[in-house]
Amino acid sequence: MRAVMVASLMVLAGVGEVAGQTASCDRACLESWLDRYLEAFVAHAPARLQLGRDVRFTENGQRLEPGDGAWRTVTGKGSYALKLADVERGQAALMGTIREADTPTIFVLRLKVANRQITEIETLVIRNQMAAENLDRVGQPRRTWYEAVPVANRLSRAELVRIANMYFSGIELNDGRGAYPISRTCARLENGSVTAGDPALVLGDAVQPSGRGPRTTCLEQFESGMFHYVTRIRDRRFVLVDPERGLAFAFAFFDNGSGDARNVTLRDGRRVLSGPSVPWTWQIAEVFKIERGEIGPVESVLHQVPYGMGSGWSSWEDAMSGRARW
């Protein structure tokens, strides 16, 4: 009886309501926060958002005040929007397009929501007009991103991260002889273009944005050793994991050290010169769908940044580390 009375008093005082708000922010709730953010963003009105007192905001790895950066230059929404949610940890993410100074631009948004307030905002503004136009032509994300995995086949959060991280390690250590838990039907959409697998698996009847596209599968690419020029994949932050849909979403940096790393020996023995002629880094956001222990659909957006750059969310030690964090 006493417990009931205390609970009632907490509700009257607002304490119970706050606790309930956190628990009640389901998938639809989290996705609605993405929509609200975009509305405020396009209106150049951060005051419309319910921001936590100590909210942290970064754009392309730089810490800013909400309202700064692309908040000043955004001019509209684009037509592509893949929305993801991690109900257990109150995380929501968007991979989509906007208009910045009326130019098609790729936009990635991660929000952490607690007690009906935004406490973390992480954004990538990828100013690659062609890639953004490609995504806009794709139009709708693949249906599989929204399909639930059968309950009997669902994996734990830790297992989803472990398998997705093998993709990163497979690229970093790529000699064509590693363990690659990749489905033969894997298809990768990268900056709006199909860069591995059958375009029909990604685009259906839609026109391939940059032509017919490759037929080499994800697994064949890994088994060839073609990624050997990527010298390090670091700051692997799996910020959103969704066991219901079998998804793992990560931010990471792909370092291209150049120099001798450009001399690649493929698994078939051929020697090729590959990769950039000077050191630089890809800043990347990537989502994987995993079923029956294998990576199927992959979608990523990325842009070139200074070599060794950090995310703004990690210590220097973690930013240089290749271990998976989640």
Image (tube, rainbow, N blue to C red):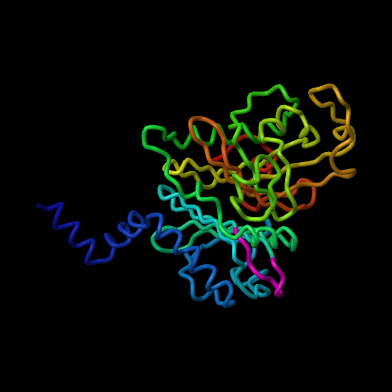
Residue 275 position, x and y percent, is 84, 40
**Main SS, magenta residues:** strand
Decide whether residue 212 is among the magenta residues: no
Q: Which residue sits at x=41%, y=50%?
A: 87
Q: Which residue sits at x=53%, y=55%?
A: 93
Residue 148 position, x and y percent, is 42, 44
The answer to which of 74 and 319 lies nearer the viewer is: 74
User: Given the current orientation, which residue lies at the most extreme left position?
Assistant: 1
The answer to which of 142 and 234 lies nearer the viewer is: 142
Decide whether residue 101 is among the magenta residues: yes
Q: Please state the extent of the stretch shown in magenta in the rendering.
A: 96-104
The number of numbered badges drawn on the structure is: 0
Q: Is residue 176 above or below residue 5?
A: above
Q: Which residue sits at x=51%, y=48%?
A: 145
Quadrant for residue 60, please give it: bottom right
- Asked whether, in this view, residue 192 is left or right of residue 31, the answer is right
Residue 86 position, x and y percent, is 45, 49
- Asked whether, in this view, residue 139 is left or right of residue 18, the answer is right
Q: Which residue sits at x=61%, y=67%?
A: 78
Residue 109 position, x and y percent, is 58, 59
Q: Is residue 6 above or below residue 67?
A: above
The answer to which of 228 and 205 lies nearer the viewer is: 205
Quadrant for residue 184, please give it: top right
